[in-house]
Image (spheres, rainbow, N blue to C red):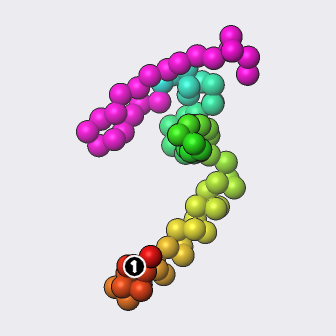
Amino acid sequence: MADSDISIAISKLTSKYQATVPRSVREALALKAGDRIAFEVCDGEVKLRKAQSIDLEYLASVESGLGEWNSDEDARSYDDL
């Protein structure tokens, strides 16, 4: 993307940490109601993009294993790390 192609859209967070995706961003990403978005965070920079099916499959696979490490015994075992 050339510097001349850069645009800025601003949205305000609500008290529930929700924000409206500005129209220019929705149009650029071809977003519609019900679509999922992905946030890529790297070195203090965040990229927003339309989530792809691979993102959703990865999320589902990770979420299914997270409860396995959520016991009092695990907390005591890893408390001093």
Residue 68 appears in the rendering: yes
Residue segment shown in magenta = 1-21
Residue at horizontal 56 percent and vertical 28 percent from the top: 26
In this view, 46 is above or below 71: above
In the rendered image, the residue lying farthest to the right is 2
Horizontally, is 69 left or right of 31 in the view? left
Horizontally, is 71 left or right of 48 in the view? left
Residue at horizontal 41 percent and vertical 30 percent from the top: 20
In this view, 41 is above or below 62: above
In this view, 16 is above or below 25: below
Magenta span contains residue 3? yes
Magenta span contains residue 20? yes
Q: Nearer the viewer, residue 76 or 68?
A: 76
Residue at horizontal 44 percent and vertical 76 percent from the top: 81
Residue 1's x, y, as percent? 73, 22
In this view, 56 is above or below 25: below
- Residue 3 position by quadrant: top right
- Amino acid on which disc 1 is placed: Asp
- Residue 71 position by quadrant: bottom left
In the rendered image, the residue lying farthest to the bottom is 73
Horizontally, is 47 left or right of 11 in the view? right
**On the image, numbered disc 1 is attached to which residue?**
80
Q: Nearer the viewer, residue 52 or 17?
A: 17
Residue 29's x, y, as percent? 63, 30
Residue 71 appears in the rendering: no
SS assignment for the magenta stretch, majority: loop
* Secondary-structure class at tag 1: loop
Residue at horizontal 42 percent and vertical 86 percent from the top: 77
- Residue 65 position by quadrant: bottom right
